[in-house]
Amino acid sequence: MERTPFKTDLESLEKKIDKLKSNKKKNGVKSFKVQNDGWRMVIELVVGMLIGFGIGLGLDIFLNTKPLFLIIFTLLGFIAGVKTMLNTAKTMKQESIEGNNL
């Protein structure tokens, strides 16, 4: 069979479509990783604050010193959450650098 220009054009168009689909899949996975990393950092901050809040509330109820330990431990939880976020960011940066060097 002889190849017609129409058939050749159709094959090249199919190749272009397949190439675009594969690029889209690769970029989609990367964008989800960025979203996951962002949510991970937010959750680390919130969990740190909630743990501090819980410890502070428990101590305030146990020692009958209502807002004192609640405020102190909520702030300590916030600080711990920020520290954890910074460590996570540093780890992500290292992984990014190592990934670019491959």
Image (spheres, grey):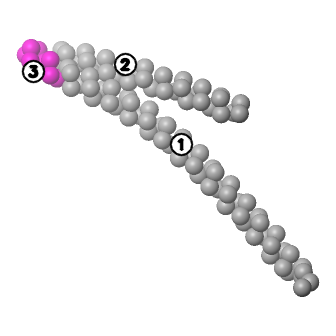
Q: Dot 3: what SS?
A: helix
Residue span colored magenta: 57-65
Q: Is residue 10 left or right of residue 45?
A: right
Q: Where residue 4 appears, x then y in whole percent?
A: 90, 82
Residue under label 1, please give it: 33
Q: Is residue 61 on the magenta stretch?
A: yes
Instruction: Classify 10 Å Cα crowding around label 1: few (below 14), some (14-19), many (20 and above).
Output: few
Q: Dot 2: what SS?
A: helix
Residue 66 visible from this viewpoint: no
Q: Amino acid at mark 3?
A: Ile
Give the residue drawn at x 55%, y 30%.
92
Q: Where residue 95 appears, x then y in whole percent?
A: 59, 30
Give the residue drawn at x 68%, y 54%.
23
Residue 74: name its quadrant: top left
Give the residue drawn at x 26%, y 26%.
51
Q: CA distance from mark 1 to mark 3?
A: 42 Å
Most extreme residue toward the right, as rendered? 2
Instruction: Classify 10 Å Cα crowding around label 2: few (below 14), some (14-19), many (20 and above).
Output: some
Q: Amino acid at mark 1?
A: Lys
Do the CB atoms of the residues marked 2 and 1 lie less than 8 Å apart?
no
Q: CA distance from mark 3 to mark 2?
A: 23 Å
Q: CA distance from mark 2 to mark 1?
A: 26 Å
Residue under label 2, please give it: 79
The first of marks 1 and 3 along the sequence is 1
Q: Quadrant of the N terminus?
A: bottom right
Q: Amino acid at mark 2?
A: Ile
Q: Dot 1: what SS?
A: helix
Residue under label 3, please give it: 61
Q: Is residue 49 on the magenta stretch?
A: no
Residue 18: name its quadrant: bottom right
Q: Main secondary structure of the magenta part?
A: helix
The first of marks 2 and 1 along the sequence is 1
